[in-house]
Each structure stands twice: as structure tokens, then as C-alpha cells.
Image (cartoon, rainbow, N blue to C red):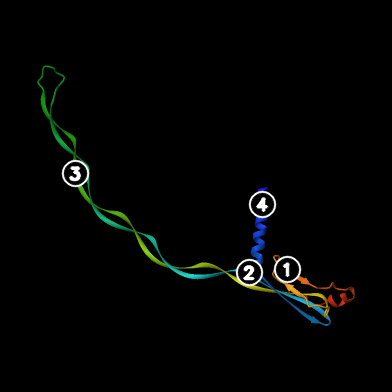
Amino acid sequence: MIHRKLIVASLALGALVTASLRADEVEYFDQNGVRYQKIRQVTQKPISETRYESRQYTTYQPRYTTDLQESVRTYQVPVTEQQWVPGYQRTLNIFAPPVLSYRLVPVTRWETRTETVRVPITRQDYVAQQRVEQIPITTQRLAQETHEHVIPIGPSGSGAPLVANSNSASGGTRLDNSQPASSNNEGVWNGVGR
């Protein structure tokens, strides 16, 4: 039920938009003994146009630079030296007194030293760059389209003049006092005007 109402409402809205966008002009003329109806329809058609504009903007790109910086480093170094160390020495005789003797022994000590080294340091900077880019811009406008239809409606001079009513809701044309086309004139109407 709700779907039917939505469909009917959308159809009615479409008919109103179509009727507002279309304008009909009706005129009649006689040619070779036949009366013709000429319908000229002017409709509005939306047209999209795309153009490109140049825009300039600034971007920032990273730039890396590496510099060598001098630095003082302190470190410990082992230094080994041979030294004479005194000591008592005993013999196998337990009754003999100990004897003082010297022997050569390696002795290790730690020394603090400094040195200058070059350390690489990387720095990040941002560099401004100007860029130009083509940006599409789409605009919409309404253009008029004209369609003409020529329809044979009967023999010319058939009594009262035909009156057209172009204000009908469906956009069609209502004819008053028009006579139906006779079968004798069909051969004349087949090749004319569509």
C-alpha cells in the first residue's frame, strides 16, 4: 500500500516537472488541399560542462641531509706490564729458612683515554615547492531543444476553423470541430511532414 502511494506520487511529480519544462506551440496551415497541424515543442535539457582551471599550491617535501660532527669519546684500555715481584721461596728442607727471591709477573692496569671521532648526524628539513595542477570544475546549465512535428488532420476548408488548446495537463493538443480524415485522402497524407 505504501509502495503504491510512493509510485503514484513519484509519477505525479515527474508529470509536473515534464509539463513545466515543456512548452508546446500549435499552428495550423493548409497545403495542397490538406490541413496540417504543426506542433513545436521547446524542452529544457540539462547539460553538464567541464572546464579545467589551473590552481597553484605549495607542498612541503622532506629533505634529508647528513653531516659529520666531531665528538670526543672516552674509553678504558687495559695496559699489561711485566714487573718484578718479591716473594719468599722455600726449599724441600723444612728446617731451612725461606729465601727472598724476585720473579717477573705480568701486571694489568686500566688507563682512561680519549679520542675524537666523526659521527654522522642526519637532519630532516622541509622544502617548499610550488606546483600547478589542472582541476576539473563541472557546471550545469539548461539548454533549449526544439522539436517540430507536422501531422495531417483533414482536408482544408472543412467548415469552422480548428481551435487548439495547448494548456492541457498532459501536454497534448485537443481539437474542437475537427472532422476525421476520409479514406479518399490517405494517399495524399502518407508522404507529408513527419
Secondary structure under the numbered disc 3 in the rendered image: strand
Dot 2 or dot 4: first in sequence order is 4
x then y, percent, for residue 142: 60, 70
Pair 1/2: label in front: 1
Report the residue marked by disc 4: 5
Identify the mark at residue 172; answer none if there is no mark. Answer: 1
Dot 4 or dot 1: first in sequence order is 4
**Residue that sits furthest to the bottom in the current view:** 32
Residue type at mark 4 is Lys
Pair 3/2: label in front: 2
Q: At x 11% / y 23%, what residue is drawn?
A: 98
Q: Is residue 42 left or right of residue 161?
A: left
Dot 3 or dot 2: first in sequence order is 2
Q: How many marks?
A: 4
Dot 1 or dot 2: first in sequence order is 2
Do the residues bearing badges 3 and 1 touch, measured as CB atoms within 8 Å?
Answer: no
x then y, percent, for residue 174: 75, 70
Secondary structure under the numbered disc 1 in the rendered image: loop
Badge 1 local density, few (<14 within 10 Å), some, or many (20+)? few
Q: CA distance from mark 3 to mark 1?
A: 109 Å
Badge 4 local density, few (<14 within 10 Å), some, or many (20+)? few
Q: Is residue 73 left or right of residue 152?
A: left
Name the image quarter holding the C terminus. Answer: bottom right
Report the residue marked by disc 2: 45
Q: CA distance from mark 4 to mark 3?
A: 96 Å
Query: In the rendered image, which quarter is residue 50 located in?
Result: bottom right
Q: CA distance from mark 2 to mark 4?
A: 28 Å
Identify the mark at residue 112; answer none if there is no mark. Answer: 3
Closer to us: 42 or 102? 42
Residue type at mark 2 is Lys
Secondary structure under the numbered disc 2 in the rendered image: strand
